[in-house]
Image: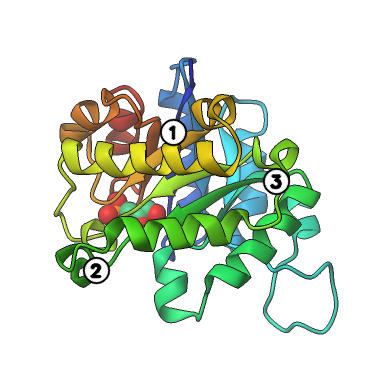
């Protein structure tokens, strides 16, 4: 049985004061041990949020990582730095990074390998654009992204990965994928992982859905066989809506 995992991707929201406030509210309201809960604030909030949640079941995640250990890479953040402020997870390959910051399947792969080396759990994002869905290319695109992400990653390392299926047309648009649409792609990804590794591995790996998930639509999505959690943007910025999804 896969344990559900709900993660909040705060994106570029919340200064450190606001982040501490939100983390404090989430900690106070969270008492559901059936679900793994992760919050992913901006880099500048990580240390302060860790101070709030460190003795709670809520885990800390970052929104990106660089693939080198250290050096002259102005503006980048290393896996070691993330570990040192208490991160256990890191989002890699979010569509916004692919769209605005030149993230590719190759850089995603390098970042996953570095994260795993430092025992950070990657939350690897994959998902198609609207025009790709309309052209019937969803499975092709997602297959390319997933194959690229896991390229050269051993089964022993890959067991720690979480995948987030985030159809780009559903992100921040209020247009959620139907449970059927999401389930279909989640199953496709799981079957692909069975081909890349094996069935037992694929059955154990957790696949989150992301894209306009809200307390009102979460339960219906989360009861589908292959949907093991959510990666939440907008609805993770308020404690009551985020916890509403955790408890859905
Ligand atoms: P929204 O929940 O705001 O659609 O964002 C989803 C997302 O991108 C999470 O990473």
Where's ligand 1: which quadrant? bottom left
- Label 2 residue near ligand 1, CB within 8 Å: no
> Could you tell me which secondary element the residue under label 1 belongs to?
helix
In which quadrant will I find the C terminus? Answer: top left
> Could you tell me which secondary element the residue under label 3 belongs to?
loop
Instruction: Say which residue appears at 20% left-offset and 62% top-offset.
Output: 136
Residue 218 is situated, as x and y percent measured from the top left of the image, at: 24, 32
Asked where in the image residue 131 lies, by quadrant, the reply is bottom left
Residue 17 is situated, as x and y percent measured from the top left of the image, at: 51, 55
Residue 25 is situated, as x and y percent measured from the top left of the image, at: 43, 34
Report the residue marked by disc 2.
Answer: 132
Q: CA distance from mark 1 to mark 3?
A: 22 Å
Relative side of 74 to 10, left or right? right
Q: Are marks 2 and 1 in contact (CB under 8 Å)?
A: no
> Could you tell me which secondary element the residue under label 2 belongs to?
helix
What is the number of the mark on residue 71? Answer: none
- Label 3 residue near ligand 1, CB within 8 Å: no
Work out whether residue 238 can be spotted.
Answer: no
What is the number of the mark on residue 120? Answer: 3
Q: CA distance from mark 2 to mark 1?
A: 36 Å
Q: CA distance from mark 2 to mark 3?
A: 31 Å
- Residues 202 and 245: in front is 202
Report the residue marked by disc 1.
Answer: 26
């Amino acid at each position: 049985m896969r344990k559900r995992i709900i993660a909040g991707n705060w994106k570029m929201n919340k200064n450190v004061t606001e982040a501490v406030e939100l983390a404090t509210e989430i900690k106070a309201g969270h008492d559901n041990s059936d679900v793994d809960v992760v919050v992913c604030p901006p880099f500048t909030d990580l240390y302060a949020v860790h101070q709030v949640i460190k003795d709670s079941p809520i885990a800390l995640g970052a929104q990106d990582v660089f693939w080198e250990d250290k050096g002259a890479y102005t503006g980048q953040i290393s896996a070691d730095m993330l570990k040192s402020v208490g991160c256990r997870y890191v989002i890699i390959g979010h569509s916004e990074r692919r769209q605005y910051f030149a993230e590719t399947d190759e850089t995603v792969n390098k970042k996953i390998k570095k994260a795993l080396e430092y025992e950070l759990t990657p939350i690897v994002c994959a998902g198609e654009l609207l025009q790709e869905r309309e052209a019937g290319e969803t499975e092709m695109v997602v297959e390319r992204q997933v194959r690229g992400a896991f390229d050269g990653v051993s089964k022993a390392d890959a067991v720690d990965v979480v995948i987030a299926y985030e159809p780009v047309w559903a992100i921040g648009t209020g247009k959620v994928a139907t449970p059927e649409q999401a389930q279909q792609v989640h199953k496709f990804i799981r079957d692909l992982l069975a081909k890349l590794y094996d069935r037992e591995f694929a059955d154990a790996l957790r696949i989150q859905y992301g894209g306009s998930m809200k307390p009102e639509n979460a339960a219906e999505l989360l009861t589908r066989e292959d949907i093991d959690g959510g990666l939440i943007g907008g609805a993770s910025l308020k404690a009551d809506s985020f916890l509403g999804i955790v408890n859905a």
